Image (tube, rainbow, N blue to C red):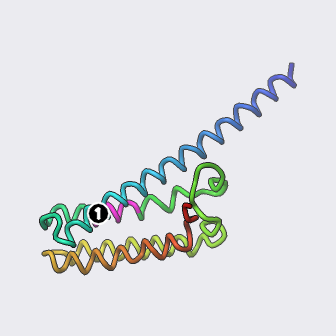
Protein backbone atom coordinates (compact mmCIF):
# COMPACT_ATOMS: atom_id res chain seq x y z
CA UNK A 1 0.00 0.00 0.00
CA UNK A 2 2.83 2.39 0.85
CA UNK A 3 4.36 1.67 -2.52
CA UNK A 4 1.13 2.58 -4.34
CA UNK A 5 0.77 5.84 -2.36
CA UNK A 6 4.42 6.73 -2.99
CA UNK A 7 4.10 5.98 -6.70
CA UNK A 8 0.93 8.06 -6.92
CA UNK A 9 2.65 10.95 -5.14
CA UNK A 10 5.57 10.82 -7.58
CA UNK A 11 3.18 10.91 -10.54
CA UNK A 12 1.25 13.86 -9.07
CA UNK A 13 4.42 15.80 -8.27
CA UNK A 14 5.79 15.14 -11.75
CA UNK A 15 2.54 16.22 -13.39
CA UNK A 16 2.42 19.34 -11.25
CA UNK A 17 5.99 20.26 -12.20
CA UNK A 18 5.26 19.73 -15.90
CA UNK A 19 2.11 21.85 -15.66
CA UNK A 20 3.99 24.64 -13.87
CA UNK A 21 6.68 24.54 -16.56
CA UNK A 22 4.08 24.76 -19.33
CA UNK A 23 2.42 27.64 -17.48
CA UNK A 24 5.63 29.66 -17.20
CA UNK A 25 6.43 29.03 -20.88
CA UNK A 26 2.92 30.16 -21.82
CA UNK A 27 3.23 33.25 -19.64
CA UNK A 28 6.49 34.32 -21.22
CA UNK A 29 5.19 33.64 -24.72
CA UNK A 30 2.18 35.86 -23.97
CA UNK A 31 4.50 38.53 -22.59
CA UNK A 32 6.55 38.48 -25.80
CA UNK A 33 3.34 38.70 -27.85
CA UNK A 34 2.44 41.79 -25.81
CA UNK A 35 5.85 43.27 -26.61
CA UNK A 36 5.33 42.45 -30.29
CA UNK A 37 1.94 44.16 -30.33
CA UNK A 38 3.46 47.23 -28.66
CA UNK A 39 6.24 47.22 -31.25
CA UNK A 40 3.76 47.10 -34.13
CA UNK A 41 1.86 50.03 -32.61
CA UNK A 42 5.06 51.98 -31.99
CA UNK A 43 6.36 51.30 -35.49
CA UNK A 44 3.11 52.51 -37.03
CA UNK A 45 3.36 55.74 -35.03
CA UNK A 46 7.06 56.23 -35.82
CA UNK A 47 6.47 55.63 -39.56
CA UNK A 48 3.52 58.00 -39.68
CA UNK A 49 1.09 55.18 -40.46
CA UNK A 50 -0.82 55.98 -37.27
CA UNK A 51 -1.29 59.40 -35.73
CA UNK A 52 0.95 60.39 -32.84
CA UNK A 53 -0.96 60.40 -29.59
CA UNK A 54 1.13 60.95 -26.49
CA UNK A 55 -0.90 58.50 -24.41
CA UNK A 56 -0.56 55.74 -27.03
CA UNK A 57 3.17 56.36 -27.36
CA UNK A 58 3.57 56.22 -23.58
CA UNK A 59 1.57 52.97 -23.48
CA UNK A 60 4.03 51.37 -25.91
CA UNK A 61 6.93 52.29 -23.63
CA UNK A 62 5.01 51.29 -20.50
CA UNK A 63 4.39 47.87 -22.03
CA UNK A 64 8.14 47.49 -22.57
CA UNK A 65 8.82 48.36 -18.92
CA UNK A 66 6.27 45.78 -17.79
CA UNK A 67 7.71 43.14 -20.12
CA UNK A 68 11.23 43.77 -18.82
CA UNK A 69 10.14 43.60 -15.19
CA UNK A 70 8.19 40.36 -15.62
CA UNK A 71 10.32 38.54 -18.17
CA UNK A 72 13.31 37.84 -15.95
CA UNK A 73 11.05 35.97 -13.52
CA UNK A 74 9.62 33.70 -16.21
CA UNK A 75 12.75 31.76 -17.13
CA UNK A 76 13.40 29.58 -14.07
CA UNK A 77 15.80 26.69 -14.19
CA UNK A 78 14.18 23.71 -15.85
CA UNK A 79 11.86 25.74 -18.08
CA UNK A 80 14.08 25.17 -21.10
CA UNK A 81 12.20 22.02 -22.08
CA UNK A 82 8.94 22.07 -24.00
CA UNK A 83 7.42 24.33 -26.64
CA UNK A 84 9.89 27.18 -26.28
CA UNK A 85 12.26 29.13 -28.47
CA UNK A 86 14.34 30.29 -25.51
CA UNK A 87 17.97 29.47 -26.29
CA UNK A 88 20.21 27.60 -23.84
CA UNK A 89 22.13 30.88 -23.41
CA UNK A 90 19.26 32.16 -21.20
CA UNK A 91 20.36 29.70 -18.51
CA UNK A 92 24.05 29.42 -19.43
CA UNK A 93 24.53 33.20 -19.27
CA UNK A 94 21.71 34.14 -16.94
CA UNK A 95 23.54 37.23 -15.70
CA UNK A 96 23.89 38.47 -19.29
CA UNK A 97 20.24 37.66 -19.95
CA UNK A 98 19.13 39.65 -16.91
CA UNK A 99 21.47 42.50 -17.85
CA UNK A 100 19.91 42.64 -21.33
CA UNK A 101 16.44 43.02 -19.82
CA UNK A 102 17.74 45.59 -17.32
CA UNK A 103 19.05 47.70 -20.22
CA UNK A 104 15.78 47.24 -22.10
CA UNK A 105 13.87 48.43 -19.03
CA UNK A 106 16.20 51.38 -18.40
CA UNK A 107 15.91 52.51 -22.03
CA UNK A 108 12.10 52.20 -21.88
CA UNK A 109 11.99 54.16 -18.61
CA UNK A 110 14.20 56.85 -20.16
CA UNK A 111 11.89 56.93 -23.16
CA UNK A 112 8.90 57.43 -20.89
CA UNK A 113 10.68 60.38 -19.26
CA UNK A 114 11.75 61.99 -22.52
CA UNK A 115 8.79 61.39 -24.85
CA UNK A 116 6.72 64.53 -25.34
CA UNK A 117 6.16 64.62 -29.10
CA UNK A 118 6.60 62.51 -32.23
CA UNK A 119 10.29 63.32 -32.67
CA UNK A 120 11.20 62.41 -29.10
CA UNK A 121 9.12 59.24 -29.36
CA UNK A 122 10.96 58.20 -32.53
CA UNK A 123 14.29 58.54 -30.73
CA UNK A 124 13.08 56.64 -27.66
CA UNK A 125 11.37 53.94 -29.70
CA UNK A 126 14.47 53.40 -31.83
CA UNK A 127 16.70 53.15 -28.78
CA UNK A 128 14.43 50.71 -26.99
CA UNK A 129 13.76 48.45 -29.96
CA UNK A 130 17.49 48.08 -30.72
CA UNK A 131 17.54 45.95 -27.57
CA UNK A 132 15.11 43.45 -29.10
CA UNK A 133 17.37 42.34 -31.92
CA UNK A 134 20.42 41.88 -29.71
CA UNK A 135 18.50 39.85 -27.17
CA UNK A 136 16.80 37.72 -29.80
CA UNK A 137 20.13 37.07 -31.51
CA UNK A 138 21.70 35.70 -28.33
CA UNK A 139 18.85 34.37 -26.23
CA UNK A 140 16.29 33.07 -28.74
CA UNK A 141 16.36 30.06 -31.05
CA UNK A 142 15.65 31.15 -34.59
CA UNK A 143 12.45 29.78 -36.05
CA UNK A 144 12.81 27.95 -39.34
Question: Was residue 48 drawn as part of the magenta stretch in this picture?
Answer: no
- The residue range painted magenta reads 60-67
- Quadrant where the N terminus sits is top right
Q: What residue does disc 1 label?
A: 62
Residue at coordinates 16% horizontally, 62% vertically from top-left? 55
Q: Is residue 102 left or right of residue 83?
A: left
Question: Was residue 65 drawn as part of the magenta stretch in this picture?
Answer: yes
Q: Is residue 107 left or right of residue 113?
A: right
Q: Residues within 10 Å of mark 1 (few under 14, many from 20)?
A: some
Q: Position of residue 83 (x, y in %)?
A: 59, 49
In which quarter of the view is residue 13 placed? top right
Q: Position of residue 77 (x, y in %)?
A: 65, 57
Which is more toward the observer, 40 or 71? 40
Give the residue at the far front of this rendering: 144
- Quadrant where the C terminus sits is bottom right
Q: Position of residue 102 (x, y in %)?
A: 44, 73
In which quarter of the view is residue 18 placed? top right
Residue at coordinates 63% horizontally, 73% vertically from top-left? 93
Residue 31 versus residue 48 in the image, above or below: above
Amino acid sequence: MKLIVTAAAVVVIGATAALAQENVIGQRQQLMKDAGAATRTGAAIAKGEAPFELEKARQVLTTYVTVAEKAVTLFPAGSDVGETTAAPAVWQDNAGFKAAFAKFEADAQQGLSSTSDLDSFKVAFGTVTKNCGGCHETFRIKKN
